[in-house]
Image: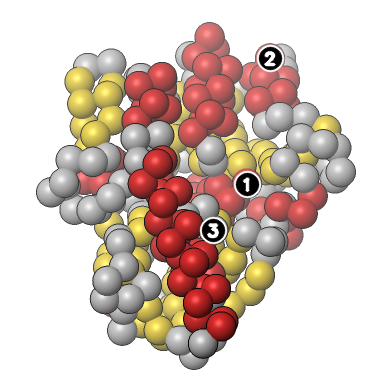
Amino acid sequence: MNKILEKEVLSDVAKLMVVEAPLVARKAQAGQFVIVRVDAYGERVPLTIADYDREAGTIVLIFQEVGKSTMQMGTLEAGDELVTVVGPLGHATELDNFGTVVCIGGGVGIAPIFPIARALKEAGNTVISIIGARTNEYLFWEDRMRAVSDELIVCTDDGSYGRKALVTEPLKELLESPGKTISRVWAIGPMIMMKFVSLTTQPFEVSTIVSLNTIMVDGTGMCGGCRVLLDDGPQFVCVDGPEFDGHRVQWDNLLSRVQFYKEQEQVAVERWHEKCKLDEVS
C-alpha cells in the first residue's frame, strides 16, 4: 500500500498527488513511469513520474480524469492509500549535452516534460520550453518550467493567457530562426499534438522524441496492448519505450488504436457514475 501524503486540485479534471513510494523514488529517472492501481480490483494505470524526492521517499503523480479509474483515483484524499504503485518502469530519457533543445508539454503533458527539461538543463543544455493548453485553467507548473528553462513560451488555444497559438507555431519559428540551431526536441501531450510536432520538425531533420505511455495496459510487456508501429516494425511502448523517435511512429495507426476500447471505457464511466449515485443515496 502506498499512502497519499498530499493532494492538489490543478483544474476541474487534473489532480496532483504526492505519494509515499521510497523504493520507486530511490531509482526514478526522468522519462520513467509507474503502474498504479486504486484498489484490489482496479485496472493498471500508467502514469509518468512527474517528480521525485529520494530523501523523502516520495513521488509526484499528475493525472487527468478521463476514465473510470482516474475518476476513482481523483476521489482519494491525503491519508488514503493506493493498493499498488509499481516502478520505476520504462527506459529513462537519453541525456547528453546536445546543445539547444526544445521541451514541449501540452495539457497534462506539462507534468512529464518537467523532469526531462530539468535533467537536460543539468546536463548542460540550453533549454527552450513551450507549454500549452486549451485555456488558462488547464495550465500549471509555469513557475517550475521557467526555473529549469533558459526560455519559456506559454500558449493557450483561446488566448486566455500567454500567446494565442498551438505549440507548433512557436516551435516552427524557432526551427526557422537563423540565430538558433535546435539539436533535439521532446514533446509530451495529446497524441494529436505529438503527431503534429513530429510533422513540424521532420522537414528540418531535427530529432524529435515523444512519450507514448497513455496507450499502455499491462506495463510489463505481457499483454501486447501497447504495440506501436514504427517505420521498421512494431515495438511495445512499455518495455521498448515509453519514448520513441516521433519521425518513425506511424501516427494514423496509433491514433486509430487508442480508440479501440472507447465503447468499453464509456460503459465503465457510466457504471461508475451510477455507483457514485447509489453510494450518495445510501
Q: Which residue is mark 3?
A: 65
Q: Secondary structure at mark 2?
A: helix
29 in relation to 154, above or below? below
Q: Secondary structure at mark 1?
A: helix
Query: Which residue ends up furthest to the top in the rendered image?
Result: 203
3D distance between C-alphas at marks 1 and 3: 12 Å
Q: Which disc is residue 176 wearing?
A: 2
Residue drawn at x 34%, y 30% as measured from the top left: 257
Between disc 2 and disc 3, the foreground one is: 3
- Image spot of residue 67 (x, y percent): 47, 55
**Residue 67 falls left or right of residue 41:** right
Q: Are marks 1 and 2 in contact (CB under 8 Å)?
A: no
Residue drawn at x 58%, y 51% as measured from the top left: 108
Q: Kindly indicate the quadrant of the structure image that contains residue 94.
A: top left
Residue drawn at x 51%, y 65% as measured from the top left: 273
Residue drawn at x 47%, y 40% as measured from the top left: 97
**Residue 76 falls left or right of residue 129:** left
First in sequence: mark 1 vs mark 3: 3
Q: Which residue is mark 1?
A: 107
**Residue type for callout 2:** Glu
**Residue type for callout 3:** Glu
Crowding at dot 3, Cα within 10 Å, few <14 / some 14-19 / many 20+, comes out as some
Q: Kindly indicate the quadrant of the structure image that contains residue 20.
A: bottom left
3D distance between C-alphas at marks 1 and 2: 25 Å
3D distance between C-alphas at marks 2 and 3: 37 Å
- Image spot of residue 42 (x, y percent): 31, 68
Between disc 1 and disc 3, the foreground one is: 3
First in sequence: mark 1 vs mark 2: 1
- Image spot of residue 146 (x, y percent): 71, 53
Front residue of this view, candidates 185 and 264? 264
